[in-house]
């Protein structure tokens, strides 16, 4: 029977992480399990930055973006000697198991620790929705709604000035933010790494729009594909559309978590504690066919994230 659990948030922050922290803490306390917040991800584990939680420690955070435990990039954690120090810090504090909230990098850290004898459960916290074998990650829904609001605003000014607007959104390895927001906002073109980048095709499509007397156009594109400002200049020169590029950036990371993210995070937090109670480790909490499951982390990380190309098809059908 596990007596003491630590929680940490690692990698990129995502709205809803606080709701997950709260759920883990409350589920533990309700079961009589001690619970510690670990600050700044694996860095805090190495430094021994632990805060013993009581019920009040997680009050008023369910609706807050970011993470009260803060996050950090700590590449040193790949080194086994560094992890040994972290484990000795856990032993000193009597923490027997961990819940790690983060992306696939954080899952690797959780896996390494489990291999060294500390049971860890991963919870997917990343706005990009880029974790394999889970239908959704914590933060995706909130970030999506932030993008939708931005695109709606851009549509107002874009149509008033008869412009083409290009919006770059996050999702370097997974274009879900672009595809979902693109459909939700009825944009002209969606460009992601899954579809591939074909500048000629983009310009051709916008030229046809302009010639068919369309008054404005919106293109949503994921980060890391091309320089959107340079693309805007080319589009303007070749299509006759006055074109502006916008990069939404870190705005997408912040903000109050949506109701969906709060519920998902709360349920995943409870589920993670239940897995640790059963003595399980090296697992991650995933949504499979709408239900929570505890899947093996190694197997999960060895799989590519499956792209739902059906949604791209649907986007094309209603362009
Ligand atoms: P994310 O979890 O969002 O993918 P990162 O890739 O930055 O973010 O990973 C978060 C942290 O996880 C890293 O800063 C590092 O401390 C730890 N980590 C990443 N990869 C490994 C690994 N192979 N072994 C051990 N720890 C790792």
Image: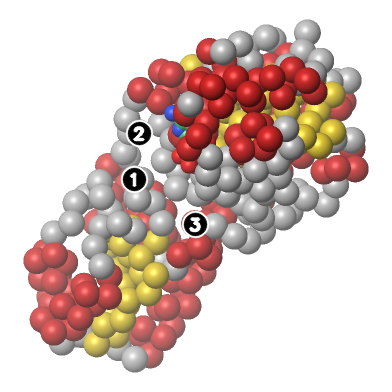
Q: Quadrant of the N terminus?
A: top right
Q: Mark 3 packing: few (<14 Cα in 10 Å), some, or many (20+)? A: many
Query: What residue is pinned by disc 1?
Result: 173
Percent position (x, y) of residue 280?
62, 12
Gap between marks 3 and 2 measured at Cα = 19 Å
> Is label 1 or label 3 in front?
1
Residue 125 visible, this angle: no
Percent position (x, y) of residue 159?
36, 85
Q: Earlier in the sequence, mark 1 or mark 2?
A: 1
Quadrant of the rendered structure where residue 204 is?
A: bottom left
Q: Is residue 236 above or below residue 111?
A: below
Badge 1 vs badge 2, beta-carbon distance below 8 Å:
yes
Q: Earlier in the sequence, mark 3 or mark 2?
A: 3
**Which label is found at residue 305?**
2
Q: Is residue 13 above or below residue 20?
A: below
**Which label is found at residue 144?**
3
The local secondary structure at tag 1 comes to loop
Q: Residue at x 12, y 75 (%)?
A: 208
Q: How many marks?
A: 3
Residue 7 is left or right of residue 168, and the answer is right
Residue 310 is left or right of residue 149, and the answer is left
> Is label 3 or label 2 in front?
2
Q: Mark 1 packing: few (<14 Cα in 10 Å), some, or many (20+)? A: some
The local secondary structure at tag 2 comes to loop
Gap between marks 1 and 2 measured at Cα = 9 Å
């Amino acid at each position: 029977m596990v007596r003491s659990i630590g929680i940490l948030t690692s990698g990129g922050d995502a709205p809803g992480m606080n709701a997950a922290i709260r759920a883990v803490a409350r589920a533990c306390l309700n079961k009589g399990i001690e619970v510690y917040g670990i600050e700044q991800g694996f860095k805090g584990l190495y430094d021994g930055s632990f805060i013993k939680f009581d019920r009040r420690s997680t009050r008023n955070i369910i609706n807050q973006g970011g993470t009260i435990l803060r996050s950090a990039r700590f590449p040193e954690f790949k080194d086994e000697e560094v992890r040994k120090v972290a484990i000795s810090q856990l032993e000193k504090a009597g923490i027997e198991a961990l819940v790690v909230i983060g992306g696939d990098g954080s899952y690797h850290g959780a896996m390494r620790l489990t291999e060294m004898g500390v049971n860890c459960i991963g919870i997917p916290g990343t706005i990009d929705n880029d974790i394999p074998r889970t239908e959704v990650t914590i933060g995706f829904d909130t970030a999506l709604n932030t993008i939708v609001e931005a695109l709606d605003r851009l549509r107002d000014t874009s149509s008033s000035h008869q412009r083409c607007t290009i919006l770059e959104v996050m999702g370097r390895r997974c274009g879900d933010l672009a595809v979902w927001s693109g459909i939700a906002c009825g944009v002209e073109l969606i460009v992601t790494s899954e579809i591939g980048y074909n500048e000629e095709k983009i310009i051709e499509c916008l030229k046809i729009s302009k010639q068919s007397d369309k008054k404005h156009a919106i293109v949503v594109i994921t980060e890391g594909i091309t320089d959107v400002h340079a693309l805007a200049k080319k589009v303007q020169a070749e299509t006759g559309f006055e074109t502006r590029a916008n990069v939404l950036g870190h705005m997408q990371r912040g903000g109050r978590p949506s109701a969906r993210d709060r519920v998902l995070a709360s349920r995943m937090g409870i589920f993670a504690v239940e897995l640790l109670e059963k003595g399980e480790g090296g697992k991650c909490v995933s949504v499979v066919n709408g239900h929570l499951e505890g899947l093996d982390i190694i197997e999960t990380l060895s799989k590519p994230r499956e792209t739902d190309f059906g949604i791209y098809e649907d986007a094309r059908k209603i362009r």
